[in-house]
Image (cartoon, rainbow, N blue to C red):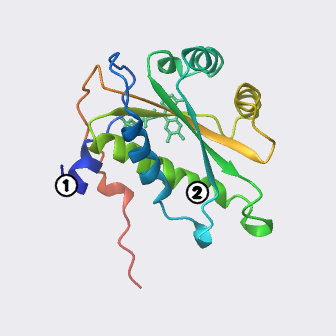
Amino acid sequence: MKDTLTIIKERVSIRAYTTEPVTDEDVETLLRAAMAAPSSKNKQPWFFVLVTQAEVREELASELPYAGMLRSAPVAIVVCGDTRVHTGYSALNWVMDCSAATENLLLAAQAIDLGAVWTGVYPYLDRIQFVRRILQLPTHIVPLNVVAIGHPATHPPHIDKWDPMKVMNFKR
Ligand SMILES: Cc1cc2nc3c(=O)[nH]c(=O)nc-3n(C[C@H](O)[C@H](O)[C@H](O)COP(=O)(O)O)c2cc1C
């Protein structure tokens, strides 16, 4: 197993997959990593919808504008937030919590040599309503993204994104 910093450094979005299936064990590994994420007040407002049926992946791919790779990804995980969990002033904290969970999931995929990509749903109302309709989700469950997952058919090089101009070393 590679060390954590190497996994973080080498993770890239993978949008093409082989036909090799993703095992249930691997899916559980990804979901366990997602649920290990930090969350505001440790409220864990996430909810995950696992989509493996080709027919459903096809429907998602056909309507989500940048998610054509869902057709060839054997597994899609829809990361959702339960908006009942955080209320009032904290109502939007589900977005940060579920984003942290998604990044954990992406890194776990990299760690076990799977390829994955975050495809955006939230905050676009048309995409949210579409995914909700297809997956028959109640209104308190908001899809944040659909993560396409499979065995990589391509191995794009990772690009070093280090930019010291984006860092301010503040001192009084
Ligand atoms: C909020 C968010 C939305 C994204 N939406 C899409 C998407 O709809 N389709 C897609 O192919 N990639 C999507 N991506 C992946 C980005 O395009 C990708 O992370 C970025 O180009 C950097 O490349 P890397 O992941 O290989 O480092 C999204 C990423 C984030 C964080």
Q: Is mark 1 within 8 Å of ligand 1?
A: no
What's the residue at 30%, 41% (across, down)?
110
The kind of secondary structure element at disc 2 is helix
State the image coordinates of residue 88 (x, y, percent, origin top left): 80, 67
What's the residue at 24%, 26% (across, down)?
155
Q: Amino acid at mark 2?
A: Met
Instruction: Pick the quarter of the image with the C terminus.
Output: bottom left
Q: CA distance from mark 2 to mark 1?
A: 25 Å
In the drawing, does residue 171 fall left or right of residue 77? left
Residue 61, placed above or below residue 108: above
Q: Say which quarter of the image contains residue 40.
A: bottom right
Q: How many residues crowd mark 2 within 10 Å: few (<14), some (14–19), many (20+)? A: some
> Which one is nearer the viewer's eye here, 53 or 37?
53
What's the residue at 23%, 31% (across, down)?
157
What's the residue at 74%, 61% (across, down)?
91
> Which one is nearer the viewer's eye here, 160 or 41?
41
Q: Earlier in the sequence, mark 2 or mark 1?
A: 1
* Label of residue 96 in the image: 2
Residue 152, placed above or below residue 120: above
The residue indicated by pointer 1 is: 3
In the drawing, does residue 80 fall left or right of residue 71? right
- For the view shown, which residue lies furthest in the left direction? 2
Q: Amino acid at mark 1?
A: Asp
* Label of residue 85 in the image: none
Is mark 2 in CB contact (under 8 Å) with mark 1?
A: no
Q: How many residues crowd mark 1 within 10 Å: few (<14), some (14–19), many (20+)? A: few
Q: Say which quarter of the image contains residue 43.
A: bottom right
State the image coordinates of residue 57 (x, y, percent, origin top left): 57, 20
Q: Say which quarter of the image contains residue 152.
A: top left
